[in-house]
Image: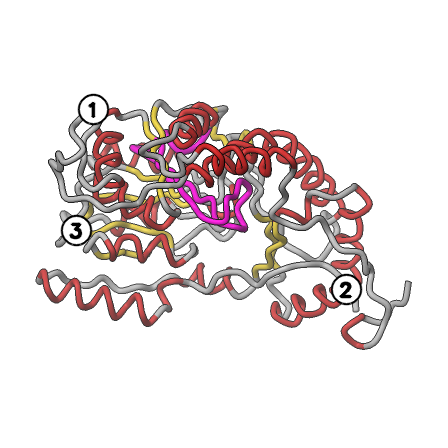
Amino acid sequence: MSSTLAIDGGTPVRSAPFPQWPMAGDEEGTAIAEVLASGRWGSTHGDRVAGFEDAFARYQQAAYGICLANGTMALVAALTAMGVGPGDEVIVPAYTFVASASAVLFANAVPVFADIRADTHLIEADQVEALITPRTRAIMAVHIAGRPCDLDALMDLGARHGIPVIEDAAQAHGASWRGRRVGAIGACGTFSFQTSKNISAGEGGVVVTDDEALADEVYSMVNLGRVRGGGWYQHDRVGYNLRLTEFQAAVLTAQLGRHPQQQATRSANAAVLTSLLSDAEVVLPAEDPRVTEHGLHLFVFQVPDRDRDAVVRALTAEGIPCLAGYAGLHRNKALRHKAEQLAGLTGMPLAQWDCPVTDRVAAATIWLPHHTLLGSVEDTADIAVAVGKVLGG
């Protein structure tokens, strides 16, 4: 193999593609055809959505699951069902997808951005505590990349201050903390089934919880204010129409059945890659024995002393799919403008959004998407070879 970087005209480490995502098999095709033939395409007439809700809730060790249109609206519905509204604040990590914060704004509340831990990319409990005010209505624990947050610290913090924790587990299907699957460790948790997610139907989401009353509130939010067991034209609340279709549930049921085997492959390859990168000029996330299963939506590492964007371009040229990842949401002008509007309408002060660790980590972070971990050990080794070649070049 040429030592010249592919981006400079050398031979790339690999030309063969990694496994593509999303993946589907005969199970999805058969299930979609069955729904099509049944004529029961909506969840109000079929049983596929209800069946998947039960199956996914059990998978995440939760008592209840309520499916809906997407992960963003899962957060909105959950926050609204928890009573979050005008005049309230929700503490959110600065390093997360925009939906974590925009969902707070859609609930007419204001996001307050907490800094993260440099060694995990996850929200820092001490930073959260410093931001709590009488207006704080919820703490959002976002399990970035599929790695659970420090739920011990966050749940303790929430209990001491009487503030519920909502888990944004959009990337954390199958992840567990101290042997318990994430999602219902907090008051509730939300997951996404968007195209890139480890269980996918193109779009879709779910809220899971152990709280029956909260589950009923979310159900009502998703179903135009209806109540379980009530009449078709009984609308006891003001709610959205966010229902999932039977087609999506058919796909998701097949995807859920395939997830344990895929997750085992990702976990094995992630362990191999971690070992192979141990001597490379990268910073890997800190190990934590309380993370008993990583969702592995992303394999994350940092290159703090390099031009991160140049490294991403060079790795891509070597045949390694990778991404630069998030910029800090505290830098997002659209979010700031909307937050200022809502704060002004309710007479709230707007907290300063200062997150220096997020700034530093975001500028150095590289993501490998989860499908790069679904290949062979040789495929995984190619990633390490490419990283070594680029950083040594």
Helix, strand or loop at mark 2:
loop
Label 1 is placed on what type of residue? Answer: Gly
Instruction: Look at 54% across and 37% down and name the residue there.
Output: 33
Q: Quadrant of residue 334?
A: bottom left
Label 3 is placed on what type of residue? Answer: Asp
How much space separates mark 1 and mark 2, taking CA atoms?
A: 57 Å
The one of 211 and 147 positioned closer to us in this rendering = 211
Q: Is residue 271 left or right of residue 235?
A: right
Label 2 is placed on what type of residue? Answer: Glu
Residue 88 is labelled as 3
Residue 318 is labelled as 2
Can you give x and y, in whole percent of width and height, for residue 241 in the image? 26, 45
Looking at the rendered image, the quarter that the N terminus falls into is: bottom right
Looking at the rendered image, the quarter that the C terminus falls into is: bottom right
Q: Quadrant of residue 293?
A: top right
Instruction: Look at 70% across and 65% down and name the residue there.
Output: 316
Total marks in image: 3
Which residue is outermost to the bottom?
8
Q: Which residues are magenta?
A: 181-208
Q: Quadrant of residue 3?
A: bottom right
Asked if the stretch drawn in magenta spans residue 175, the answer is no
Q: Earlier in the sequence, mark 3 or mark 2?
A: 3
